[in-house]
Amino acid sequence: MTLYTKPSCSLCTKAKVLLLQAKLKFTEINVLEDADLMERYQFEIPVLIGDDGRELMKGAFSAGRIASLVARG
């Protein structure tokens, strides 16, 4: 999975903590380092993209939403 974030983003920090607590593996990408990603996600981060390219979550993550993701496999 890929987690799109940016520095000084409290929602991004919370998303990372929740994903780590759920023991989910992800690659973090800072959208500020890529103009195309910044344009696409600047108002929607954090955004979690599955290995298949599907958007799994964006905005405010919650433990419940993460648990649903884990249950789906």
Image (cartoon, rainbow, N blue to C red):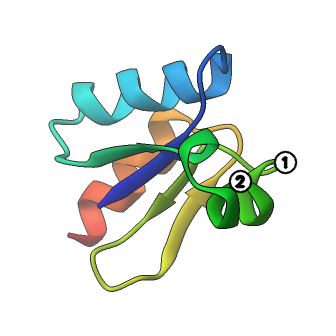
Quarter of the picture holding the C terminus:
bottom left
Q: Quadrant of residue 59?
A: top right
| The one of 22 and 13 positioned closer to us in this rendering | 13
Return the residue at label 2.
38
Give, as a three-letter code, the residue at label 1: Phe
In the rendered structure, the answer to whether residue 71 lies left or right of residue 15 reads left
Residue 25 horizontal/vertical position (percent): 17, 47
| The one of 71 and 24 positioned closer to us in this rendering | 24
Return the residue at label 1.
43
What residue is drawn where x is 32% and y is 36%? 19
What residue is drawn where x is 67% and y is 67%? 36
Quarter of the picture holding the N terminus:
bottom left
Residue 20 horizontal/vertical position (percent): 24, 29
| The one of 70 and 50 positioned closer to us in this rendering | 50
| The one of 59 and 67 positioned closer to us in this rendering | 59
Q: Residue furthest right?
A: 43
Q: Quadrant of residue 5?
A: top right
